[in-house]
Image: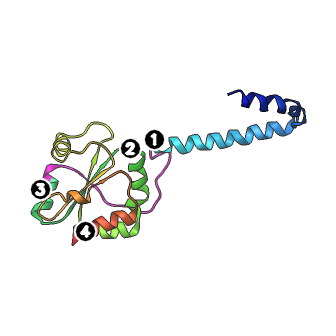
Amino acid sequence: MGLPYLFLGLAANRIGRLPKAGAWMVWVKRALGVVLLGFALYLVRPMLPKTIWPAPAQAGVAWMPYSQAAFDAAVGEQRPIVIDVYADWCIPCVEMDHTTFRHPDVVQALAPVVTLRVDATREVSPDARQLFDRYNVFGAPTVLWFDRQGREREALRLSGYANAEEFLERLAQLLE
């Protein structure tokens, strides 16, 4: 346990050889300050309003707000359904929204599918609460997949971030 102190004692006389503080140290402090501010902005960026930090101009998936009526209408039309549980404070949700759901192949592949989104940023609607209870949805991001008859394809469920390739694989299984 005393071994580190022995090394510290042996190295004490070499401290005098370290460079002295001077003008170069001021520039190092400034450079590290800029790096620190950049990292802080990177961490805070998902929480900033979209008017301050605009999203990329690339078009994404056209989500409709989830409601039981919209779900029933899609089942009536015998169209497959994808439900995304999203929240602004959820970093993987925001990342999927900016990458996966803006990927041109994903946008094109979702064209024949009804895309519904539950925004869980604040309060959720009673319809969304019933959806959460019925299908055991515990958090965001969660993507639920429903066939043309409105039955959930549990094996395809996504909980957490998924890149475009993984999303497209599951979508292909839904559309089979």
Q: Are marks 2 and 1 in contact (CB under 8 Å)?
A: yes
Residue 111 seen by the camera = no
Left or right of residue 6: residue 164: left
The mark lying in front, picked from 3 and 4, is 4
- Label placed on residue 88: 2
N-term mark: 3 or 4: 3
Label 1 vs label 3: CA separation?
33 Å
Label 2 vs label 4: CA separation?
29 Å
Q: Report if residue 91 lies within the magenta region.
A: no
Question: Residue under circle 4?
Answer: 173
Left or right of residue 77: residue 82: right
What x and y, as percent, mark residue 1? 67, 28
Question: Residue under circle 3?
Answer: 72
Label 3 vs label 4: CA separation?
22 Å
As helix, strand or loop, the secondary structure at mark 4 comes to helix
N-term mark: 2 or 1: 1
As helix, strand or loop, the secondary structure at mark 2 comes to loop
Q: Amino acid at mark 4?
A: Gln
**Closer to us: 35 or 69:** 35
| Residue 113, picture quadrant | bottom left
The mark lying in front, picked from 1 and 4, is 4
N-term mark: 2 or 3: 3
The residue at 17%/39% (across/down) is: 126
Q: Amino acid at mark 2?
A: Asp
